Amino acid sequence: MAKRGTIQETSILLKTINNAILDKQGEQLLNLDLTKIENAVAKHFVICHANSSTQVNAIANNIEAMVKKNLDERVWKKEGYSNSEWILLDYANVVVHVFQTQAREFYKLEKLWADAETILIND
């Protein structure tokens, strides 16, 4: 595999994460490219939602499993599994946000980063 943190490796990580989300029927899957935003906390955000804590958990677990299996990479930090309203998985260059529907509507994270290039991912 390419050197850690390269554009190629980040692209493969994004694709793996997107596939893991789609595999568990995550909704309104967005990739936000933050590379042109000065002082951004990551290079990319991945945002999706689901209608229950069970599905949010399943999506997050599938992301971790597929990234580990396909790329032999573990999540650097993770938060939110205790209530599964908003699970955050931090892979350094890519930060994944898996919301329950009402939490996503409340926080409107994609609006906070409105100047990022936004790509809607479909099956």
Image (cartoon, rainbow, N blue to C red):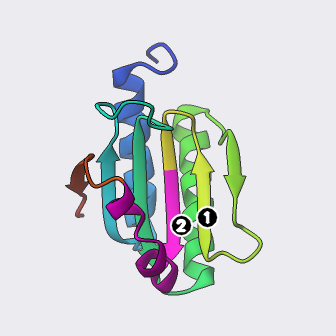
Q: Residue at x 44, y 50 (%)?
A: 17
State the quadrant of the C terminus.
Answer: bottom left
Residue drawn at 56 percent across, 60 percent down: 62
SS label for mark 2: helix
Q: Is residue 65 above or below residue 111?
A: above
Q: Which residues are magenta?
A: 96-112
Name the dominant secondary structure of the magenta segment.
helix
Q: Which residue is mark 1?
A: 87
Residue type at tag 2: Ile
Where's residue 119, x and y in %? Answer: 22, 53
Q: Are marks 2 and 1 in contact (CB under 8 Å)?
A: yes
Residue 52 at what x, y percent from top left? Answer: 55, 86
Alpha-carbon neighbours of circle 1 within 10 Å: few (<14), some, or many (≥20)?
A: many
Q: Secondary structure at mark 1?
A: strand
Check disc 2 and report the residue beneath it: 59
Q: Amino acid at mark 1?
A: Ile
